[in-house]
Amino acid sequence: MITTMDITISKAEQSKLKDVNLENLPFGKFFTDHMLEADYENGEWKNIEIKPYQPLLLSPSLAVLHYGQSIFEGIKAYKDADDNASIFRPKDNFERFNISATRMQMPTVPEELFMEGMKQLVTLDKNWIPNKPDHSLYIRPFMFSTDELIGVRPSDTYKFMIILAPTGPYYSKPMRIYVEEKYVRAAKGGVGYAKAAGNYAAAMYATAEAKKKGYDQVLWTDAFEHKYVQECGTMNVFFIIGNTAITPSMKQGTILDGVTRRSTITLLKEMGFAVEERKLGIHEIIEAYKANLLFEVFGTGTAATISMIKELRYKDFEMHFDVDKWKTAPLVKSWLNDIREGKRPDKYNWMVKL
Ligand code: COI
């Protein structure tokens, strides 16, 4: 055992890497040799350990299993051509993690635990970072309540963990999207802006219904009028209308402040687009489509990076797009990939080297 600062590290006796083909990776199915675990008790974080990846022993009365106090993040690590590893904008995810924690009445995690813990873990499992376009090491920090009590109240104890999964693309093909008008992902005053596990559970039924109709995901609309678009599946969404890129604004607290969303806004501006973060109604989208001004529609997310949308269906109206002719979404994607892989200057200082 080696002890550095506050983190105790115990290494796996053998690496499982030889059993995993880094050339052919489904999203989030394989996990690396180590994980980070820390406990919150009596108002402080303790037992901070990096140790071999292993199952947890949990009580059936564990609070999270009943009331869902659980949040997570998604971050990615990449390698450049010289095998140097770096992590994409982890501080942004750290900040968002604590925003989610506060909204879910959970303790915040100190920056050192989140950032140093993550860096040490990724450094230890650096050989797991795939070296292939569209592939990366997905970093999943998460926290959940651990009181053994089924009374409804915020837990006094929590576990913070980080696990790592080498991954390929999340959505591999351009997507067909159903504009959702019946079910709701988030309402003003709710938890839509938090990366709360329950948000994803709550989306599954509507997504399954859309899949039965032959669509890949839903485009969520606002809870009151079902008129203004919010997020698409697990992604933020962008519409290129004329020379302007429009994405729903954060003002209502109903969408996630995506790190890929922020990065896309920056790169679109660098490309010369006017970028508007505002309310965008489905009828404005349809009008732009009918006027041949709706040039591109795409989703952005850590897991998905940039995912092109080839069809949007609203009621009985279908909008089809010839994604092969698109320039902008593929360019944003390749600039992002190039920055991550060290092929384009990192002028916004997004990459944190290990
Ligand atoms: C991400 O983009 O990292 C997400 O959190 C989406 C997901 C639930 C895989």
Image (cartoon, rainbow, N blue to C red):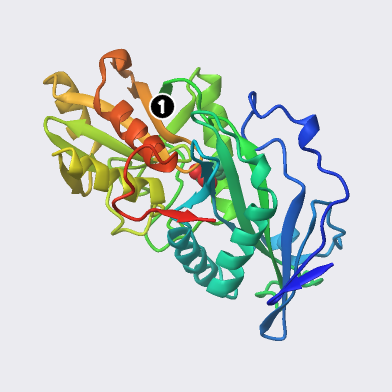
Q: Name the residue under label 1.
A: 178
**Residue 162 is drawn in which quadrant?**
bottom right
**Dot 1 alpha-carbon crowd within 10 angstroms: few under 14, some 14 to 19, many 20 or more:** many
> Image quadrant for the N terminus?
bottom right
Q: In this view, does 263 lie above or below 60?
A: above
Residue 181 in view, yes or no: no
Residue drawn 65% across the image and 75% down it: 154
Q: Nearer the viewer, residue 334 or 353?
A: 353
Q: What residue type is labelled 1?
A: Tyr
- Residue 211 screen position, x and y as percent: 54, 23
- Residue 128 screen position, x and y as percent: 67, 40
SS at mark 1 in the image: strand
Q: Which of 219 and 213 is in front in this view?
A: 219
Q: In this view, does 169 lie above or below 256?
A: above
- Of all residues, the one furthest to the front in this rendering is 82
- Residue 282 screen position, x and y as percent: 25, 34
**Residue 19 is drawn in which quadrant?**
top right
- Residue 39 screen position, x and y as percent: 73, 72
Q: In this view, does 65 lie to the left or right of 177?
A: right
Residue drawn 30% across the image and 43% down it: 264
- Of all residues, the one furthest to the bottom in this rendering is 42
The number of numbered discs placed on residues in the rendered structure image is: 1
> Image quadrant for the C terminus?
bottom right
Residue drawn 66% across the image and 85% down it: 43
Residue 98 in view, yes or no: yes
Residue drawn 30% across the image and 54% down it: 348
Q: In this view, does 296 lie to the left or right of 315?
A: left
Does the numbered disc 1 mark a residue whose Cβ is under 8 Å from ligand 1? no
**Residue 21 is drawn in which quadrant?**
top right
Q: In this view, does 209 lie to the left or right of 342?
A: right
Q: Is residue 175 above or below residue 199?
A: above
